[in-house]
Structures are given as C-alpha cells and as structure tokens.
Amino acid sequence: MRGVKVFFVGLAMPFLMAATPQAQIFQSSIYSSVTSDSSLVQALDCMTETKAQWAQQAILGENLTKRPIKVLFRDLAQLSPAYASFDALGWKDGNQLFIYINNRHRNAPPEALASLLSHEAVHQDPYSSIEEETYGWGYEANVWIEMKQKKPELNALSPNEYPLVRRLNTLENMFKAANYTNTRIKEAVSTNPGYRNLPLRSPGFGE
C-alpha cells in the first residue's frame, strides 16, 4: 500500500506542476482585455465570490458600454493638476471606459485595490453626483470590510506603508460608526472640495 501511495504522488506532482501555469494563463486571459498589470489581475481575481463580484463583472464588460473597462496605474496629474491627489479616477473616451489608479498605490495589497476598483466600477457614464459618490464610497467600504473578514491579516497592515489602506480604514470606520449605513460617508462626500460642483443626483442615482 505504501508503494501505491508513493506511485500516485509521483503521478500527481508533474500533473499539478503542469496545471499551475495553465491556470495562471487562464486567469490572465480572462482579464487580458482589461489590464496586463499582474497586481491588477490579482485584485480583479480576488473579487470573485465576494460583494465585489458585481464590480468585477462590470469591469469585464457588463456595464453601460457593453465593453471591458481598461484598468491601469497612472500619474493622474498628467490628466490635470487637479487630479494629482486623487486615489483613482473613472474616465470615458468615446465609448471606452477607463479606471486610472494613482501610481502611489502600485504596492497596495490586491484586496485594497479590489475595494477601490469596486467603487470606480460604479461610474459608467460622464455624469456623477453626491448620491453616486456616496454609493461608491459605501460600496468600497463594504467590500473592504468583507476582504478583512476573509483575510484577517489585512488588519495588521500599516496605513503609513499603504496610503490606500489608510483611506479604506477611514471609510470602514465611517461606515461602521453609522451602523453600517452611508450616513457619515454622505456627509464626508458632501463636504469634499473635489466634489463641490457635483449635483445631488445623477442618472441611476436618485434621478
């Protein structure tokens, strides 16, 4: 019996070693129309079977344009000096949607990037509003909470090392302080200088 066990292990090992690169290629191919960045592929992949799965599918093409959203890191100041401090930005060029993530978040954990992407996937047209941003921030917080529940070691990450984690922890605290509602988040959005010119409502968000 012992010899049989060793025999099967011997067969299984080459099989597993051969399958692993294939699995990686398969996963990468799913997202190849979205990004070629390995850290963003990891972020997209960890959205599966979580509250972020809606956003994952939106990014893959289930959105208003019916096309995959292009996701990449970028120096947002190149778009406009006003965007230099933004964490991420939804952008539309013709019928193509983009999600640009600030270069400073390149080293962020995949789960943190997944939370941020969940927010940005909400923006699918040229119109935004206080209600839409509030929903996006709340969704981002909710996803981050779930990611930390699934992977408790995320609680030990240093906000000083990862600016995105600092942002997400702040959103999480606001969400929890309002009894898991968007009340405090809406207050923060409404007083954010970056949103001072936004209307209260936009298509799909109270309009």
Image: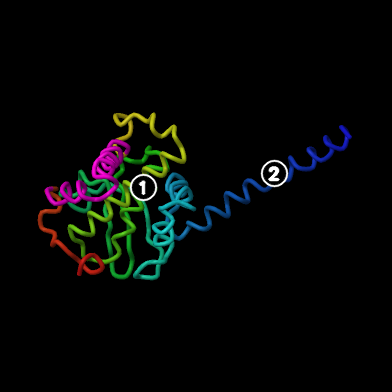
The disc placed on residue 115 is 1
Asked if the residue under mark 1 is in contact with the one under mark 2, i.e. CB atoms within 8 Å, the reply is: no
Vertical position of residue 141 compared to residue 124: above or below: above
Residue 53, picture quadrant: bottom left
Image mark for residue 16: 2
- Residue at the image point whose x is 39% and y is 57% from the top: 55
The local crowd at label 2, few if under 14, some if 14 to 19, many if 20 or more residues have their Cα within 10 Å, is: few
Characterize the magenta stretch by its predominant secondary structure. Answer: helix
Q: What is the three-letter code of the residue carrying label 2?
A: Leu
- Mark 1 residue crowding within 10 angstroms, few (<14) / some (14–19) / many (20+): many
Q: Secondary structure at mark 1?
A: helix
The CA distance from mark 2 to mark 1 is 31 Å
Read off the magenta span.
165-191
The secondary structure type at the circle numbered 2 is: helix
Between 37 and 15, which is closer to the camera in this rendering?
15
Find residue 26 and report its image quarter: bottom right
In the rendering, at what x and y percent does residue 71 appear? 37, 54
- Which residue ends up furthest to the front in the rendered image? 179
> Which quadrant of the figure contains the C terminus?
bottom left
Task: Tell me the residue at 41%/44% (across/down).
Answer: 146
Compared across the picture, whether 2 is left or right of 206 comes to right
> What type is the residue that disc 1 sits on?
Ser
Q: Is residue 27 left or right of residue 86?
A: right
Relative placement, left or right, of 22 versus 39 is right
